Amino acid sequence: MLKGKKIVLGITGSIAAYKACYIIRGLIKKGAEVQVVITPAGKEFITPITLSALTQKPVISDFFSQRDGTWHSHVALGLWADAMIIAPCTASSLGKMANGIADNMLITTYLSMKAPVFIAPAMDLDMYAHPTTQQNIEKLKSFGNMFIEPQSGYLASGLEGKGRMEEPDVIVNRIESYFRGGEKDLEGKNIMITAGPTYEKIDPVRFIGNYSSGKMGFALAEECARRGAKVTLIAGPVSISTNSTNIKRIDVESCEEMYSTAIECFKDMDAAILCAAVADFKPEFIADNKIKREKEDLTITLKPTHDIAAELGRNKKGNQKLIGFALETNNEVTNAEGKLMRKNLDFIVLNSLRTEGTCFRSDDNKISIISENGQKDFEKKNKQAVAEDIINEMVSIL
């Protein structure tokens, strides 16, 4: 899908600038032509000669290339490109882009760009969380720019948190997915997706939860929206944002909230994908005040939560499709097949905690799709690519 595409890659002054080499390599391997535009600060982190060697093109940084009157035209670049990616994008560059401060070649190119623009922020966690940065991001989103959200992890400052630029292969896949978007096979469809964990309160301070990050569910929502669907995303407590305007997000915390929202929304849906890691049990009683450590042992009586999949399976109409997930630790296929039948699912997506580097908090997943027609096994992929596989399967039965 990237063969013959012309991509402008903007690089700003971030330690993550070295990752631009992998972005270039990924784009070129898929057949794209890449032109790098770098800020003066960016050149402090990675040299133009490295970037030029990878792209086979001179790197553009300054308005004037020589002292003979020749100059680089940001307007021409804006007309030439099929897409622009700014990765990494610092807080400074975000602010300049949001407010039209055209003091370097990269910002003037951005302001002249006729093609879609993708922005992959990279900065320390406090800078990313600052209201000014968040306001600039929202402003740029309102202009139609598409954000590739940073991830949580260890940062150059030595701190740990959200602000690390997304991995190069995910960025490349996101661009490829965009150009594949001419395929609108979900146009006119209404899809409900649940994502993330649920938290079941013990007292005002503590809760029962799980490690779900919501990444898989959000990837599914973005893929459905890209393919033309109107998506209702019911999200548990997660720190991920959505990009598409086709996604209506409803935030919940507990299983009870997710259950009641899902039951109400499903009535108008063509299909539902139940990707959330919903707690199976909750405390029978929630303490009004924080439970004090007054003795060595504490017993909490648990009771089952609502089974959202089973209830939707009982209520679904003949033309509705219901897709579930099964995360297993043993007897994976047998357990998934049992869940498929008991809950009246059209197919179930199986993944196993025994597969390293997948499932909770990971950017990758390795799945099998099980239905009454048999089992399809897929290779380990990033979650955006996995989402595409799952939605392809859903489209085939709608």
Image: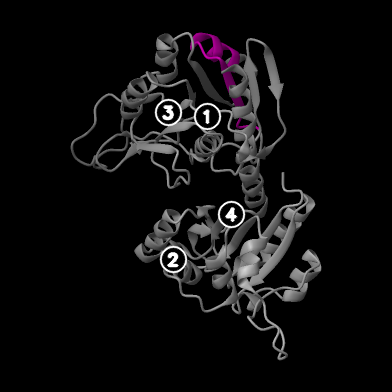
Quarter residue 306 falls in: top left
Total count of labels: 4
Horizontal relation, residue 194 to residue 27: left or right: left
Position of residue 9 measured from the top left corner of the image (x, y, whole percent): 65, 63
Q: Which residue is mark 1?
A: 187
3 or 4: mark nearer the eye:
4
Instruction: Please identify the quarter of the rendering in which residue 177 is found.
Output: top right
Q: Secondary structure at mark 3?
A: loop
| Mark 3 lies on residue | 278
Q: Are marks 3 and 1 in contact (CB under 8 Å)?
A: no
Badge 3 amino acid? Val
Viewed as shown, does residue 206 lie left or right of 194? left
Choose the circle earlier in sequence order: 4 or 2. 2
Alpha-carbon distance for marks 3 and 1? 29 Å
Query: What color scheme is it?
Result: one colour
Which callout, 1 or 2, points to the residue nearer the camera?
Answer: 1
Q: Earlier in the sequence, mark 1 or mark 2?
A: 2
Residue designated by label 2: 98
What's the magenta region?
336-354
Between 124 and 360, the one lying in front of the other is 124
Q: Is residue 226 above or below residue 166?
A: above
